[in-house]
Amino acid sequence: MNDQTMTPEERAANLKGMGSSRKRVEDVRFTQGKGNYVDDIKLDGMLFGDFVRSPYAHARVVSVNKEAALAQPGVIAVLTAEDLAPLGLHWMPTLAGDKQMVLADGKVLFQGQEVAFVVAEDRYIAADAAELVEVEYEELPVLTDPFEALKSDVVLREDIADQTEGAHGPRKHHNHIFTWEQGDKDATEAILAEADVVAEEMVYYHRTHPCPLETCGSVASMDKVTGKLTLYGTFQAPHAIRTVVSLISGIAEHNIRVISPDIGGGFGNKVGAYAGYVCSVVASIVTGKPVKWVEDRMENLMSTAFARDYWMQGKIAATKDGKITGLWCHTTADHGGFDACADPTKFPAGFMNICTGSYDIPTAYLAVDGVYTNKAPGGVAYRCSFRVTEAAYFIERMIEVLAIKLNMDAAELRRINFIKADQFPYQSALGWEYDSGDYHTAWDKALKAVDYDGLRAEQAQRVEEFKAGKTRKLLGIGLTHFTEIVGAGPVKNCDILGLGMFDSCEIRIHPTGSAIARLGTISQGQGHATTFAQIIASEIGLPADDITLEEGDTDTAPYGLGTYGSRSTPVAGAATAMAARKIRAKAQMIAAYLLEVHDDDVEWDVDRFSVKGAPERFKTMKEIAFAAYNQAIPGLEPGLEAVSYYDPPNMTYPFGAYICVMEIDVDTGEWDVRKFYALDDCGTRINPMIIDGQVHGGVTEALAIAMGQEIAYDEMGNVKTGTLMDFFLPTAWETPNYITDYTVTPSPHHPIGAKGVGESPNVGGVPCFSNAVHDAFRPFGLVQSHMPHDHWRIWKIANGLGMHG
Amino acid sequence: MSKMHVKLTVNGKEVEGLAEPRTLLIHFLREDLKITGPHIGCETSHCGACTVDIDGKSVKSCTTFVAQVNGADITTVEGLTNDDGSLGVLQEMFREHHGLQCGFCTPGMITRAHRLLQENPNPTEEEIRFGMAGNLCRCTGYQNIVKAISASADMLNAQKEAAE
């Protein structure tokens, strides 16, 4: 078969473009152990850094004695805040407009805080020497409860104690960071006062941690001859890191090359800038040698960015027949010792104002108060887009609480309140314009797929059997319909540290018809090298297998804001399509010249331009590519390449309907997921295999969070979950199989209609699992119980409801 | 600290070197031998990213001193590639069934699965899930890993049958 005899469908299939479950190109390396992660990097003369960390959650640092450590053979340097101060690097700006200590400057604010950085010839010597650094502490009162912190006389941040104005407006108390308000307070309170029914509840979304399997790390190499700094690291946003390093170090940006090599999972953990990155850079400058820093798991869980920790007080108003009329939410957000949340600048509580969810709620009000406590800083979007999981969990719990109050079926309550398909684009009461959706279709498909009515009948029977003493197991049916907001974002309102949140793609077509594309994003397992090549293949008709994709090297890739918040496909994916279209536009002119017709007389046909009305006269993209490099075409420059910087006009709003069927043993608190059905609508689907993989993984992370995973502190501020012994990561044994399904509602403003999917399963999964637990106990009077629902806490629910006799 | 002489067979090749008594096997493999397939994920034997095969058993090399295994026959994921450089059956099936995403757990997963299929050439789904419970993955939710191992078992059994 050749180009002439193949049908357009066959030619399209050969491209392995959009819609193809193309196998991943990354896997050939990874399956052989030939990935290149930060800890795999080994440079000549490389030294190792290790931290001395505070055992106390709040203490003054009276003195640091380095002598014994420096006396150890193989120890090169010990850095403290005093050493960094002359460079102005003992503090660094956070992504949230605050600043944080790189190394303890007079005091420590959380257990595990970095106090000194030891540099030695190998990692064993560095670890030994860290033990020999003598630090004298003077303990201070510890605040681990954000409500107490707002009342306490204890000042956590003495450096800003007198500042009544913070990065996000007035501060009400020395431990208060900001108040962020959205919506109409007066109107919402008026509706609450007059409503038929108001349900009120405190919904707590506990502190947890993204815990990628690879911890954070960096290798800094300052070349004193060229004055160039090369910084390898676990960076989800390498270009932003380059700019930040330049701004805080004073090294000109063109003299900094940041490289994110392969990244062993990110999930938000690798968005932030950490003390280890800064210290490895300083140590390399000081010693003139490359310096590697790689944290261990305990350091990762104790000190790098946590997620969630939102106390969400909610009120939801409705008519007697269940039509929601208003939503009120006040959130107390525990940010730890420094405000290092990773959110767009104008959104100190992220996109928490998506908390009206999938529902047509005419009036709403949201206020968020950020608070300092003696916990680790962070507040990253753990597999979600800037607090969307908190918002989704809040509204999906409030719906259930309202259903109880109304004595209504929660599936029906959702249905009568969904935004209708003909209401899109939909303006939400809290300020967003939802781009597209068809919630009723998705919901009906999901309910039918699991035989919802049958499940409810089975549940009713189970309750009878339980009451009759015939079983000790309950059946919970967890429901969730979530709406995400991803693809940050439009430069007009989305920036991080002043950097607009556009993204980019550069494509170069080689003379023989293969190509290389470079993007401003960075894959951490999402399979960008596979999927972005598919977008290009469909747009310009070259096989995806002939397109190399590169990311993560700031010397070669165009500037972009990186990969998190499900933004790669909505933003960089759009840039990829737009860059490809620029190439196709030039290719059209080349084809017309070669075919000796006017530009308008050729038309695109899968992988070629053919003469309108004469499809046998055509030039394939491969032929056009060669012509671009060997023909002098009047009016056209040689070559075939394009770059696009894409500023999205709006966010995208993926959605989904998830249903979980869970068995719960009331005597042991053990749970078993009997069925989990996940319907996702992420708009146009680029690679169904990868989408399914993202859903499996995201729901499993949701399972972990809902059913046991937490960063817990005791009242002294000690981290109780500092290793994988205590921090729950599900194994293959307790993880169920998932049923995936989909509908397709393309985004109207995205060039290929894609919305992003990586985080949807976590956003939808957490409330779904939690609602299943609540639903099992609903017939026995449970209204609200906080996550994580580990066996002990589930047992306590049963015990509290008098179910243990 | 004084160093001791260690001699190992790694992926079929005899290697030797000097190591402190406290040197962990994972560090000896990664730093001295530059075999960077096995990874470090937790240092407490929980995650299994460091899993290697030692004398026919799956072992977590992050909590094993190299001195403990002096003279042992060790296989890492690098040793599971075919002699002609093509992917081995497990490697190919992990790719075919999308059994990996970020790739960080993959070397340990595949090395453990290799031993599991030696121990039990016809595992049920339940046996695969139980047998792989010492290896954590944060990306895939295991569903496709289970599929990949099951498909590998089928393929290896078919190959064995054809050879007999």
Image: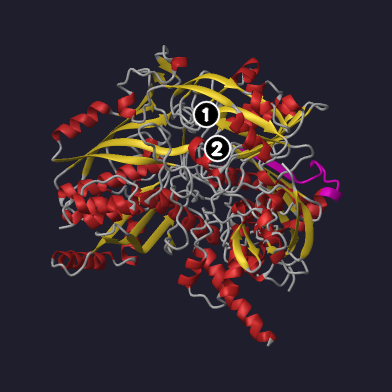
* Subunit that carries the residue with mark 1: A
Element type at mark 1: loop
Q: Position of residue A637 (x, y in %)?
A: 80, 41
Left or right: B121 with respect to A366?
right
Element type at mark 2: loop
Q: Which of marks 1 and 2 is nearer the N terminus?
A: 1
Q: Is residue A635 magenta?
A: yes
Residue A32 image-quadrant placement: bottom right
Cα–Cα gap, marks 1 and 2: 9 Å
Amino acid type, residue under disc 2 in the picture: Val
Amino acid type, residue under disc 1 in the picture: Leu
Is disc 2 surrounded by few (<14), some (14 to 19) or many (20+) residues within 10 Å?
Answer: many
Kindly indicate whether the residue at mark 2 contacts the one at mark 1 (C-beta within 8 angstroms): yes
| Residue furthest top in the image | A162
Question: What colouring method underlies this structural image?
Answer: secondary structure
Location of the C terminus of chain A (image quadrant): bottom left
Location of the N terminus of chain A (image quadrant): bottom right
Which span is picked out in magenta? A629-648
On screen, residue A46 above or below A134: below
Residue A681 appears in view? no
| Residue furthest front in the image | B2
Q: Dot 1 corresponds to which residue?
A: A95
Q: Dot 2 corresponds to which residue?
A: A271
Name the dominant secondary structure of the magenta segment.
Answer: loop
